[in-house]
Amino acid sequence: MFSLSMYGFSSGTLASSHSLKKNTLRKEGSQFRSKQNQQQPESRITVRMATMDFKALTAPVGILRILEVIFTCVTFSLVASVGHATDSFWTWCMFSWCFCFCVTILTLVLEFTSLSSKLPISWDDFTASFAMLATLMVLTASILYSIFFTCASCGRQIAACVLSFLTFILYAVEIGLTLAKPGEISGFLSTVPGLLKVLEAFVACVIFICLYFINYTLYPGLQWCVAVYSICFIFALLIILLTIGRLLSRFPAPFSKVLIVCNVLAVLMYITAAVIWPFYCFRNNPRPSYCPAHCGWNLLVVISFMTFFNLIAYIVDTVYSFKLVFLTTET
């Protein structure tokens, strides 16, 4: 009969050794699995919750944006309740209010959730340029709608105009709050030359809208003026997009010097347009006896006025750029 006692083993000793081996195997298995998990951290997906920043809503700029959202929403709601119109000016007014409403509420959401800091753009430049653009768009929409679509007995239209002008004031105040102070480090579009670039591009857009109703292909001089408006608009738009996209550092030449050269060329080109456009448009072309607000002759006057306005803007932009580059560098 085979016995374990003859070899010096008892049944209790064998059971304890067997359980010890099982425990050792379990520990080794758990250690192996933990090492394997540590070696492959990329296989796990970590979901991070957005940080809620209530200061974005309670700060002065945040309160202004909340009011802008409310006012623009009420404005285009009143206009839509009156009825739809196929006029291009009505379309521009409605687009301006809806566009400003959507971008402003998007700005509030991104800043409230702290996602604005994670975007691959210059957020300060974006908000400053949009505030300037919204100010100009809402002002234009307020003027156009009050001229073409209101009357003494139009209650909802008058209310929409009043709210639109109040929204314009709110956006103008936002510009004052976001404008860079002297000696403050900020983005280019938060400075006076940056805001002037937005103004120049917007004025060019107004000119393009008026050109839609003008047959400017009759004379080569008018075609040259349209080319001036287009080239200067493209330059201004490129500078805005490069600034927001943080691509100015990759520019192969000094940005300040290139900006001055572009401004000087724009001034010279706009001087020619300011002389040629009125000469061809108003020579032997008096104002018709019947000329409502949206007749072609009045649009020619608007384009002439916007040409001189943009010329002044480019002159101020050039002088300010010279002051920033040369005088600041010398001091």
Image (cartoon, helix red, strand yellow):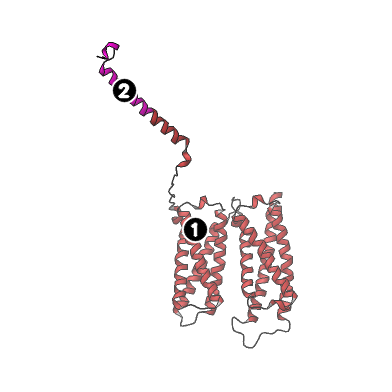
Mark sitting on residue 62: none
Give the number of the mark in front: 1 or 2: 2
Question: Is residue 61 shown left or right of residue 30?
Answer: right
List x then y, in percent, for residue 87. Answer: 54, 78
In terms of secondary structure, where does tag 2 sit? Answer: helix
**What residue did someone put label 2 on?**
18
Q: Which region of the structure is painted magenta?
A: 1-27
Question: Is residue 42 shown left or right of residue 270?
Answer: left
**What residue did someone put label 1 on?**
107
List x then y, in percent, for residue 276. Answer: 74, 74
List x then y, in percent, for residue 8. Answer: 29, 12
The residue sitting at 71% across, 79% down in the picture is 281
Question: Is residue 203 shown left or right of residue 276?
Answer: left
Question: Is residue 286 shown left or right of residue 187?
Answer: right
Chief secondary structure of the magenta portion? helix
Q: Please, is residue 177 above or below residue 149 in the view?
A: above
Residue 293's image quarter? bottom right
List x then y, in percent, for residue 65. Answer: 48, 61
Query: As shown in the figure, which amino acid type bears the numbered disc 2?
Result: His
Q: Is residue 23 magenta?
A: yes
Q: Is residue 82 magenta?
A: no
Query: As shown in the figure, which amino acid type bears the numbered disc 1?
Result: Thr
